[in-house]
Amino acid sequence: MVALAYVFSNTPPSELARIKASGTLVVATRNGPTTYYQGPSGPTGFEYDLVEAFARYLGVKVRWVFPHNGSNILSMVEYGRVELAAAGIAKTPQREQAVRFGPTYQTITQQVIYLSGRRRPRSVKDLIGKTITVLANSSFSARLQALKKKYPGLSWRTSLNTSAEELLYRVYKGQIDYTIDDSNDFMLNRRYYPQLVAAFNLGKPQQLAWAMRKNGDNSLYDATVKFFAKIKKDGTLHRITERYYGHVRNYDYVGTFTFMKYVETRLPKWIPLFKAAGKKYHINWRLLAAQSYQESHWNPNAVSPTGVRGLMMLTPPTAAHLGVKNLVDPEESVMGGAAYLDEVLGWIPQSVKEPDRMWFALASYNVGFGHILDAMAIARKLGKNQNSWTAIKDILPLLTQRKWYSLTRNGYARGREAVTYVQNIRSYYDILMWLKKHRDGQSLKQPLPSSLQFLPPSL
């Protein structure tokens, strides 16, 4: 009926009305950890989640477009080839002349990245005479152009048909001295290259926003304004942000470096065990490996101060319940740990959906399911979403405070420890998935770093 109404109307339909009539929102983005990528269970990414939520708000589907050259995204918007660009785009005065930006949803800074062990640059002056490579037609290039007026000796190269991650790799390999990356992108990627360091921020913080065509039609823009007001108020924006960045904010260089070393020296021996347990209990074996590393650093003889032992650090009562007779036997420990995690997953209420369901289960594995129920009860009392890991991870630390745990059925708990436990496992799991992606040739054009060439093809 809507489409027929257009036929008999002298007024052309608004852009938003055309989108709703077609049932499709056409969105340009780029592949990357902060935008859109293929995860273990399908498409995922910060921008992916935001746009899909917006599409549901409008009652339409999304058709994703991936330009061969990421620098073409804004021109696709400008000339009407797509209706929206959601690609971690920084608002700049120059870009605002060509496109219209929606509400801002994230603040980032541009950072100069260098390899630890080399002389750290302290200011723009220290960049003069060095090899700097940045993405072509990027905000990084524009920033350097502006700085050149004050620092005439500043020079750099631009790279087409590449990614920020590839440039980080080149810094890691010593092929270039420096690159520039957005702080949110570097926050995710630094776990994979723990030797890379942000030397200093380049310029003032910038705001990220979606880009739309400047065509005198405010309908789509107005819809984005209402949408972001809604998701900021109801907590959706915070939950999406926490999902992708919450577990990587407290970066541990030494811990990540040690993990990468043990991926080489310890993990290969145990991969067959993790695979067998994962297959039996329908759990991604890399997640089990990540959990085991958090528990024991893949040391089958590990013993904690509380007496738990083995690769999966099972307690004696849990081991007895599972029929595990030898806590330090690697096969028994891994199979027992996987069986227990599978059992705990079955306790989590069906109202908790993945991936939060797994984070609830891991927290239960660490602190006990009763305390998770207590945290969910507190969430209800505070008017928060009891089925959201973002809410529960903020509440669990309250269980160390008498004013809160005295209200619960199970009392005091080391809730902050459970949060750290889950966040560390998520980060280790991300790294293992990243290594798989690179091993399968799905990302960098370059081969894996030489220190990781040992990895078996199955990783």
Image (cartoon, rainbow, N blue to C red):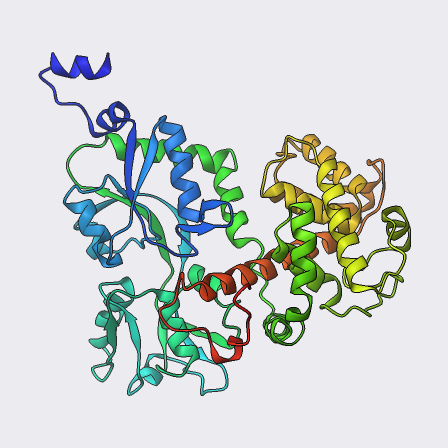
Nearer to us in this view, 95 or 40: 40
x and y percentages locating residue 84 in the rendered image: 27, 41
Q: Is residue 103 above or below residue 316?
A: above
- Which residue appears at 38% of the width and 40% of the height? 51
Residue, far left? 10
In the image: residue 309, left or right of residue 278: right
Nearer to us in this view, 124 or 388: 388
User: What is the number of callouts on the image?
Assistant: 0
In the image: residue 343, left or right of residue 87: right
In the image: residue 189, left or right of residue 309: left
- Which residue appears at 52% of the width and 37% of the height? 235
- Where residue 325 sits, quadrant-wise, is bottom right
- Which residue appears at 36% of the width and 63% of the height? 204
- Can you say which quadrant of the picture contains the C terminus? bottom right
Q: In this view, does 232 lie above or below 148?
A: above
- Where residue 440 sits, quadrant-wise, is bottom left
x and y percentages locating residue 402 in the rendered image: 83, 45
x and y percentages locating residue 157 in the rendered image: 24, 76
In the image: residue 459, left or right of residue 421: left
x and y percentages locating residue 458 in the rendered image: 55, 63
- Which residue appears at 25% of the width and 26% of the height? 22
* Residue 112 appears in the figure: no
* Residue 287 appears in the figure: yes
- Where residue 374 sits, quadrant-wise, is top right
- Can you say which quadrant of the picture contains the N terminus? top left
